Amino acid sequence: MKKINVLLLTSSLAFSLASVADDKSVIPPAPNGIEFPADYPNWRVISISHRTDNNSMRTILGNDIAIEAARAGNTNPWPDGAVLGKVVWKQTAKKHWPSAIAPDKFVHAEFMFRDSKKWAGNGTGWGWARWVGTQQKPYGKDAGFSQECISCHTPVKGNDWVFTTPAMFPTVFK
Amino acid sequence: MKKINVLLLTSSLAFSLASVADDKSVIPPAPNGIEFPADYPNWRVISISHRTDNNSMRTILGNDIAIEAARAGNTNPWPDGAVLGKVVWKQTAKKHWPSAIAPDKFVHAEFMFRDSKKWAGNGTGWGWARWVGTQQKPYGKDAGFSQECISCHTPVKGNDWVFTTPAMFPTVFK
């Protein structure tokens, strides 16, 4: 009986580890070699936005380094190692409160990876990547796709290429 | 030299612990006795919303039990121990992308604490609480304030009193 339990536990553990490995292996890296940050749904919130020009809702998340920088006001430039993630959904009106707009279908998740040496060549110090749709398919035919990201972010070149202003959480920001 | 380092380390640790205690002690509990959940800015995202009727932006966060329930689709009812937090800001148009609406000034943070036995008496199984403004002042003159919350949430009584539908994160939700 004890042996069976051990076997069950072992196979259950092996299955869990295999699932994690699968999650990472089935989603290819971006064409510029950036690997998919599979744990981004566990990152904390930096801000949110509603793009009324294309009817989408967004939350801007940060990895631990980005969250620490945001809370310290250390965002121009953001420190090496910071990763910002923007999760985008189509919008919908809430059934029981129609004037409230909320996320509907998932569109894509896109990221900025700060590494001032590695990405000095593109003039921004950020590595850019996007994974599209529920299959999280890498965006772009080749590494040149990031020029599209950079072009769109040019209006905020003076803000370290970042549109987002961290939202205020008074119990953390003193 | 070693002794000085140990002393510095000890006093630094004591200072950190005192700061944490201070943070909790300066923000009073809600009139119904619910304590302020000081770590809510570290909770993960369940969804977001834009209330166009009062020009506010919101992110809906969850503690670990709520996040696990949201990802498992176990939300009607939500399990005991789940806490949902709604962080509310006034809205502003982004300077460099004016059709994008984003958080401006902090308004309040409000919470639903699921404890089906403790809060059976109010008919919802949830404890309700709100802390207002950057001072995070408890909302309500007495414990009766929660009737105001419940009244507003009555249209979603059939959804376990919750307006929020968890937003889809495809790398977590299979």
Image (cartoon, coloured by chain):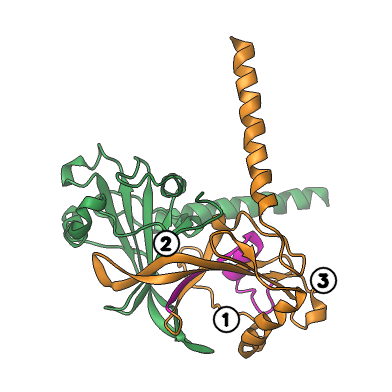
Chain colours: A green, B orange
On the same chain: label 1 and label 3? Answer: yes
Subunit of label 3: B
Residue A49 visible somewhere in the drawing: no
What is the quadrant of residue A167 in the picture? bottom left
Residue appearing at x 62%, y 85% in the figure: B152
Residue appearing at x 56%, y 54% in the figure: A171
State the SS at label 3: loop
Q: Which residue is mark 3?
A: B118
| Side (left or right) of B99 relative to B46 | left
Residue B124: percent from left, percent from top: 74, 81
Q: Nearer the viewer, residue A12 or B28?
A: B28
Residue A147: percent from left, percent from top: 16, 56
Subunit of label 1: B
Q: Which mark is residue B43?
A: none
Crowd around label 2: few <14 · some 14–19 · many ≥20 (10 Å): many
Type of amino acid at the residue the image marks with label 3 = Lys
Residue appearing at x 16%, y 59% in the figure: A151
Crowd around label 3: few <14 · some 14–19 · many ≥20 (10 Å): few
| Side (left or right) of B152 relative to B48 | right
Work out whether mark 1 precedes mark 3 in sequence or the reverse, and give the earlier one. Answer: 3
On the same chain: label 1 and label 2? Answer: no
State the SS at label 2: strand
Instruction: Report how far apart the C-alphas of labels 3 and 2 lie in the structure.
Output: 34 Å
State the SS at label 1: loop
Type of amino acid at the residue the image marks with label 1 = Phe
Q: Which residue is mark 1?
A: B163
Q: Magenta stretch: give its range.
A: B55-78
Q: Nearer the viewer, residue A39 or B17?
A: B17
Residue B88: percent from left, percent from top: 51, 69
Type of amino acid at the residue the image marks with label 2 = Ser
Contact flag, marks 1 and 3 (Cβ < 8 Å): no
Q: Which mark is residue A47?
A: 2
